[in-house]
Image: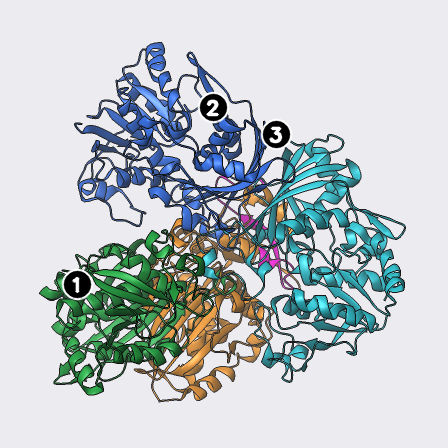
Chain colours: A cyan, B blue, C green, D orange
């Protein structure tokens, strides 16, 4: 396979940096353009980016010029870590100009013809891409990944939906600070504290899983017929979102049956062979006190969803805790994974 | 009112220290005895106690001798901060010897004739005290307070139960480190992390609120007919437990009606005049990001339950977050409050 | 004493909020004006201020209008919590207009005729106030308090200087997040981390103590002839700065003699009677592991300097750790204390 | 090179786990025995070890039996993560029995004939090994690594000593929780707090660098003629110790010259080729706010010492901050590195 040129939009922010970090040494993709805000355009990435990740900025990135965020970059694939408002405006321009946008931003997630994609969950939704291109007359396309808290949570629901059906779910999140970007949450708000509110987050948790778990019927996704009620909280954790979930199934199942469904869950063949696919989609831990964000977020290089404490629920059928790395699986890593899938399917 | 002599059992531990702190300057109670483990007996409290609270150890406590934990102390009232196993064994001995035990320990909480008491919630249950004394032939009695996470949560349910009825509740806790005592949770487990498990905690959250919200029918408490499903988590917070609750009511109610019920909730007259009673039983905050453990735990000197984010639930009727100080209202302060109630009622 | 009207400039920020909190119920001062940025002017303080302190906003403050920061407010005393640039510009205008400015900002601290004041350390420097007024033709005056890290550190040096003389000091700070204001330090920088740098802080620690420990000779302060070398670090603490200091004395002294000098240190009579003066200026703790920011910052309502671990130094004479509350003694509380002193001396 | 069998003593503790983690896939060493306390002997390592590291326990370790800590194991090399008292007693027994002990424990560090070794600093001290064996009549030997805080600090001093000479050093540490092992420091002591004391630590920081920086003269190490004064603090960090150092040189040097000396510092040829040797012994960062424990501890896989903020000192000549990974370079990784050196030199 020849290497594809890719660009990262909004490359100097926290998620943009994750894209740069994860694309370092990628077997299929070569970063040829990094875009940034006015303040940084004109200088190099090394000059303009206040790198906050614990590994070093890759050498090749240090000397790349930061360019303006506008369509026409030398890249077939464009990863977007843009802020909401800017994403809303410019992502369609890139798609119109023939570029394939893989976006971490929220504005286009719920568009009927835009796949909201987790390869292990709804690879079939990529069939929306030609629909989207034709309908909109675009040379390129937009594919989005979901909200970072919805990611692992939705992965954990998929085998339950497939095996038993899912009716209703209570979900309470304990979310890491990195989910708010940098500078994000002030330390005066998180040291010795919890913030029981994250703006706009709960409605995403109510809606996005239903789309991803929905079925593509012709050119339209039939939303999954399940109801979610979420409470979202910010806690003093760097990376790794934890969700406590109580699930009502269509068909009653024991905790052991639920564990078996999760452990036997496999991605499709085409997904399994993608460079970013982890060995295990879901890892179910047997210890009573796992998953924990710090100890489990890096499972499968941050791409595995870790579940634990699967037990009977006093009201619904089953309850458990699930952790997923919010800036890898839940953001940059997820977008790259999505791009890999479209490349493998010949859609890019 | 003349001052009553009181003792603190297990006074050198974290909860024991809170008793000493909160009893400093108490208008009704004078501490005359402090008990400790073998290691500390014989020395003074100042010598034997590794004081971990941010205020100073009271001067009078510093020079009190630490004595053995056995019945016969010069005190009508005995506050117990003993560990579970020891509480199980010695609290009945104190009661038999004519002392009124107010216990923070769990072993006797679910005994049919022992009040599990929060003055604002179930003051009527104190009528079990004479039943208990007669049945067991004790000169004294045992009254317990509930699990620290159940405290604020149960207070918040009381006006809902009274006004609308409560059927089912999902409750997810984010609990402070002090709930595990000292040394308690290693910092290697809590820095940049969440522990999604607290041994024995969930079953207490399922059972204890039902007893406290139950109705005393003659000599027996009819458990409240509601079902609770809990997930409990430990987070990097010093003091203050937060619970995210989703509630199914008997009679549907809007968030506004729920707020009104909480805000108009009053303790009975006799309770309102107790020294430890806060001005407000429940404070409902209007800000979108409250309650927060660090900013709300000291409301009403740590005795007020703070509720916020009252909103419609997608599955049940209403959801909200509730915070309560786990070592004041949820432990030592709660026990002292209970003792005050029994004194006011002439039961001590 | 009749009550004096006071204003707080920059009242909506973190230090401004401390002023409002500490002035609540002050026996001498009544807040009559609160100023804020353009965004907040016109509304009430309750509307414009995102209150971040753990106690409640005082009721009287909630309904005060936020006004523009310009001279001519109805207040004899003006407390300034303004940002550096604005303080530089407007504080002299207030002084010119006849108002007595007590400032927490840095721009005028090193002006030769402006007292940089800690009442217990250099009350005599208030004699600069009439000098300043005459020289500048001002009806009012400017008095500043020092950098929050310099505060407790300078207090701890004062008895050593008086008793033994001080030549050279190494000082390494571990500073709380609140020192950077709100929003201040991102939690992504402080969770599981230390930032070994605080912009502009070390030069203040080198210079300010020399001025405060200097002697007023006629109309000029003779800087204390001591050299300080500082390293400043930000750590995951909410309030309370800790400084590790190694001190070379003029005359050798044992740790016991140093402790005795610190413990016997008293403020002057006029200072001792001020409302904000703590019972002890310096508290020396005997435990091996104190002072600690969380456990000692509130000593003397946040106005006492707490010292511990006084021991022989391998290079200089003595070393110790010192903690002081950075937003009380080191900011708003210190400014109020300064104003009290000038009122008591009849200079306001 | 054939693979050597190695054992880990005290393998279930925090440092023992690091040994197991770092020996996974080691090109020269194969773990054949793991020892533990009575509680764990007889079961497998997977059963007896409460694994606290964020990577998974290696599969091969999971099924190894935990055996008693006594000489005679099938291993030429023995890594010791034993607690002080046990190390004191049993390490000499292993050495007597012909095994080469590489110890992380403190009791034998200051023995005149025991190398206290950091390969990049004092590889020449390995010549003590044959001296030790002959003098004591041992078939094996003991080689120790130094205190985890002394490690990076001593590495940073080495090029200064070689190039300019070093007379006196002030050193203030901000140490990670993992330095105290597991369970170690209670979270109630570290959240929103600093503990300005670590038992026994300062005397190690005063003595150990002098031995490591000393010169082997025949069979005796001449201690380096420098004086160190240390303050040690525990902060809310998982891994990575930070030291703020102010250094008096023999020959004055500018910060630029100091940086040049550090950057040009190389290990000897034999050391450079060891499997655990990092590409850079010392990395000097140019940013004003580095090194930071979380962002720099993993430099060179946790084996590189990271220095920053090199600047002129107001009292001595130069000051800087230095970070090193305390459980890799400063503990298990350091011991493995030492063993590699002795193997390469043919001393094992």
In the rendering, at what x and y percent does residue C94 appear?
29, 76
Q: Is residue D69 above or below residue D135?
A: above
Q: Chain of mark 3?
A: A
Residue C334 visible (yes or no): no
| Residue bearing mark 1 | C259
Marks 3/1 same chain: no
> Is D41 included in the stretch rendered in magenta?
yes
| Neighbourhood count class around disc 2 (C-alpha, 10 Å): few under 14, some 14–19, many 20 upward | many
> Is D38 included in the stretch rendered in magenta?
yes
The Cα–Cα distance between marks 2 and 1, rounded to whole angstroms, is: 56 Å
In the rendering, at what x and y percent does residue A130 appear?
89, 61
Judged from the image, the secondary structure of the residue bearing numbered disc 1 is helix
Residue B92 visible (yes or no): yes
Q: Is residue B271 shown left or right of residue C274?
A: right
Q: Chain of mark 2?
A: B
Q: Comparing marks 3 and 1, which lies closer to the viewer?
A: 3
Q: Chain of mark 1?
A: C
Q: Comparing marks 3 and 2, which lies closer to the viewer?
A: 2
State the extent of the magenta-drawn residues as a range. Answer: D21-44
Indicate the quadrant containing the N terminus of chain C: top left, top right, bottom left or bottom right.
bottom left
In the rendering, at what x and y percent does residue A150 appear?
67, 51
Judged from the image, the secondary structure of the residue bearing numbered disc 3 is loop
Q: Residue at x 23, y 69 (%)?
A: C76
In the rendering, at what x and y percent does residue C42 appear?
43, 65
| Residue bearing mark 2 | B211
Judged from the image, the secondary structure of the residue bearing numbered disc 2 is helix
Query: Is there a contact, CB below 8 Å, between mark 3 and mark 2?
Result: no
Marks 3/2 same chain: no
Q: Is residue C255 shown left or right of residue B225?
A: left
Q: Residue at x 53, y 36 (%)?
A: B257
| Residue bearing mark 3 | A314
Query: Is there a contact, CB below 8 Å, between mark 3 and mark 1?
Result: no
């Amino acid at each position: 396979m020849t290497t594809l040129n890719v660009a990262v939009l909004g490359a100097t922010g926290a998620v943009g940096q994750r894209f740069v970090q994860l694309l370092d040494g990628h077997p299929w993709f070569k970063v040829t353009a990094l875009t940034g805000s006015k303040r940084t355009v004109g200088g190099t990435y090394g000059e303009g980016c206040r790198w906050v990740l614990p590994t070093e900025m890759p050498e090749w990135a240090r000397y790349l010029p930061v360019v303006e965020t506008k369509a026409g970059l030398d890249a077939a694939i464009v990863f977007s870590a843009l802020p909401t408002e800017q994403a809303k405006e410019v992502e369609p321009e890139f798609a119109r100009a023939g570029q394939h946008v893989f976006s971490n931003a929220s504005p286009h997630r719920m568009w009927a013809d835009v796949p909201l994609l987790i390869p292990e969950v709804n690879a079939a939704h990529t069939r929306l891409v030609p629909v989207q291109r034709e309908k909109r007359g675009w040379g390129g396309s937009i594919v989005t990944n979901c909200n970072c808290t919805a990611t692992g949570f939705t992965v954990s629901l998929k085998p339950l939906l497939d095996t038993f059906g899912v009716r209703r779910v209570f979900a309470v999140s304990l979310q890491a600070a990195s989910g708010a970007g940098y500078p994000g949450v002030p330390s005066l708000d998180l040291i010795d504290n919890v913030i029981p509110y994250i703006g706009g987050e709960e409605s995403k948790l109510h809606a996005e899983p239903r789309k991803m778990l929905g079925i593509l019927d012709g050119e339209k996704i039939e939303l999954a017929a399940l109801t979610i009620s979420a409470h979202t909280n910010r806690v003093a954790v760097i990376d790794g979102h934890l969700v406590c979930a109580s699930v009502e199934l269509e068909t009653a199942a024991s905790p052991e049956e639920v564990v078996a469904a999760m452990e036997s869950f496999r991605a499709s063949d085409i997904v399994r062979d993608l460079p970013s696919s982890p060995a295990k989609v879901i890892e179910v831990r047997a210890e009573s006190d796992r998953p924990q964000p710090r100890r489990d977020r890096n499972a499968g290089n941050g791409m595995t969803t870790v579940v634990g404490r699967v037990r009977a629920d006093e009201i619904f059928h089953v309850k458990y805790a699930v952790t997923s790395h919010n800036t890898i699986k839940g953001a940059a890593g997820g977008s790259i994974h999505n791009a890999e899938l479209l490349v493998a399917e010949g859609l890019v």
